[in-house]
Each structure stands twice: as C-alpha cells, then as structure tokens.
Image: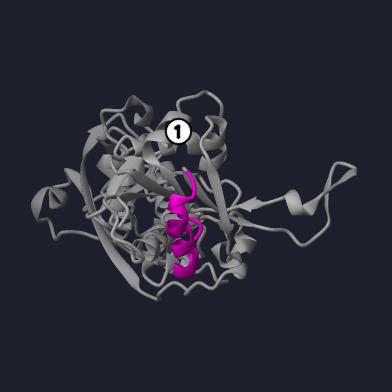
Amino acid sequence: MLDISLIMLGAGNSSRFELPVKKQWLRIGSDPLWLATTKNLSGFYTFKDIIVVSKECEYMARFAPHYKFVTGGETRQQSLKNALNLVNSDFVLVSDIARPCITHELFNKIIDGAQQADCVVPALKIADTAYFGDDTIDREKIKLIQTPQLSKTNLLKKALQTDTLYTDDSSAMRAVGASVWHVLGDEKAHKITIKNDLSKIPLAPPSNEQFVGTGFDVHKFERGRELWLCGEKIDYEFGLKAHSDGDVALHALTDAILGAAGFGDIGELFPDTDMKFKNISSVLLLQEAYKKVQNVGFDIVNADVTIMAERPKISKFKRKMEENIANALNLTPSRINVKATTTEKLGFVGRGEGIAAIASANLKYYDWTK
C-alpha cells in the first residue's frame, strides 16, 4: 500500500460561479460540497493525512475536526505549496473540491499508475475538430487534463519552487524533468466552474433543514448621539453609546443570523477595537454579516425583532423598520417582524437608562437546484 496524503484545493473565490453561494459551500444533502467531495475520495483509500485548503479554515474545521486545514494563497500554486508544507508522505494526491463525482474506477487507475512515472494524471481525449486561431490542430495530440493527480512528494515540492505559475501539477513536474503518465480520464469527473456545470453532474439536492439563531444586545443612552433603531433615525434627546452607530436592534439581529449559521458573533466579525467600524451604519454590518452567511450556503427565511424601551415610544416606526431590514436583506417585508415593548418600569430599561433588543432568525440551505 502506497504512503499517500490527500490535498483538496478549495480556496478560490468562485468569481465565475455567479451565485450568492461559493461553490464549495453548496449543500449536497446536508454536507457542503467541499466535505462531500473529500468524503468521496477519502472513502477509496486510507490516506496518511487529509489536508483541505481554504480561506475559511476555522469554520470548516467545525465540520470535520479530523482533517487538517491550511489557508490558501492568491493562486492555486501558492495554495498547493502551503498544503505541501504539511505533507511528509512519499506520495501526494491533489484534487479539486469542485470535482465531486470522481469514481472509484478512475481513482484506481491513478493509483495503479504510480509505478509508471513520477506523476500520474487523468486525461480526456477530444472528439471534435479543434482550432488554434485559424489553424486546425491534430486532435489526437490534445488532452484535457483532470484531477486528482498523483505525484512523488519530493519532486512536486521541488517543481513548485519557481515564480512560473502552473495551472496543474503535471505541468510543473514536467518542467523539472519529472516523468508524467496519463491514464484515461472520466467525463463524470467534471469540474464545477460556472453555475451551468451543476446540470452536467448528478448531485443530491440540499436538505430542507432549517436553523434558528437568537441574538441579544443592550446599549445605554448617551447625550450628543443620534438614535438609530432598525436602520431608522428616531428623533430623541439621546442616542446609544457604541463604537458603531449603536443600532441595538440590528446588532441583535446580526447576532441571530450569525448564530443560525454557526458563524460566531458580531464582535468577532466587527471588533470595537477596529477604527474602520467607528460610527459605521449597523445596516452595513448586517449586510456584510449576511453576505458571509450566504457565501457559506445559507438563505434567510424570516426574522423577528423585539425592542425593549421605556422611552422613546417607537410603535409608530415599526413598519418602516421592517422595510429597512427587508431592503437590507433583499426580502419582502412580510418576512420581517418588529415588536416594541417596555419592561414595566423594571431594570435599567424601565428606568430609561438605555434600550435592549432580542432577535431570532431562521435560515435554510440555498437551493441551487432552482
């Protein structure tokens, strides 16, 4: 049995995908794509290490604490070099998280080819006539290169010690004189690059699970500041003391949305020690937090906010507040509910010293099948 580590590359920004969700976070059943793809490949072999390259390592590790995670670079090559720093096996198998349907048959071909060369690569032939500019090309000489690719670790590390950028491992290996062996690839190992690629491979739809998050926040009054609640400016003698604009209701809602996605809290994303958030609109913080939640595969279903204030009276602003939140989250106002209450003169709220808010939000998986 060969001594092999598995590297899964998934640090891209999905810039060509044109959906609000990064492709690596599309849900296949309950699993994000990166996890479903890694489970598929790791089920074929006992790897020494499984290393996932990402820009969301801390969040990913909550899904699979038995994997190793490493932060990706700005290029595929840099991401791979970062991962190779963790590899001490004889061989390394490198694949893309965007190839979720690699078959056991293709995997075995690659492993069986390990004795043939320093690098084993699946490649597809083309059936159509090919042109380069105005000139035809001998299609028998054209190969479409796929992953996973199996390489001798020491040679791949050496091959990547260059400023020349390569789009796959075999190109870098060949450049340093390593031998490359091609095995017949598989159409099923199609890579997801644009959204239309989703129709070309058989994938299970996302599950219909829903996730609930709650948020709570409180701020005391401070003279000389504007009062903002749910993105609405309220005419009052006091504002709320805070690093941002102090919109206590949107802070609670932001925490609820982050909590439903298991994404920490508002203080982690927007620390009050960072001056770029000084006096910032909490509407912008809400939108940025929701964008992060969308990127990892969620859509919001509805939200409910309760504002606790003895004064000022805010009942007349509730519909406008709902509209503000709906606009920020690209929802209809019917999905947002804002309530106002007092604390019956009890506590700091009852004494008119500040305002508190509690919120809940429901999320579901983004339905990429539609």
Examine the image and state in which quarter residue 189 appears. Answer: bottom right
> In the visual, does 334 lie left or right of 268?
right
Q: Which residue lies most toward the left here?
A: 347
Is residue 110 within the magenta segment?
yes
Locate the N terminus and report the quarter of the image it occupies.
bottom left
Q: Is residue 353 visible?
A: yes
Front-most of residues 89 and 54: 89
The answer to which of 226 and 313 lies nearer the viewer is 226
Residue 283 lies, with reference to residue 176, above or below; the image says below
Circle 1: element type: helix
Give the residue at the far right of this rendering: 134
The 10 Å Cα crowd at callout 1, few under 14, some 14 to 19, many 20 or more, is: some
Q: Who is closer to the viewer here, 357 or 13?
A: 13
Vertical placement of 133 versus 318: above or below?
A: above
Question: How far across and how far down the image is residue 365, in percent?
Answer: 42, 67
Query: Can see residue 249?
Result: no
What residue range appears in magenta? 96-117
Q: How far across and how far down the image is residue 343, in percent?
A: 15, 59
Residue holding disc 1: 78
Residue 162 image position (x, y, % from top left): 50, 24
The image quarter in which residue 246 lies: top left
Q: Is residue 119 above or below residue 43?
A: above
Residue 50 is inside the magenta segment: no
Q: Amino acid under label 1?
A: Gln
Percent coordinates x, y for residue 171 in the rendering: 57, 38
Q: Residue at x 43, y 61 (%)?
A: 33
Q: Is residue 288 above or below residue 338?
A: above
Quadrant of the image containing the C terminus = bottom right
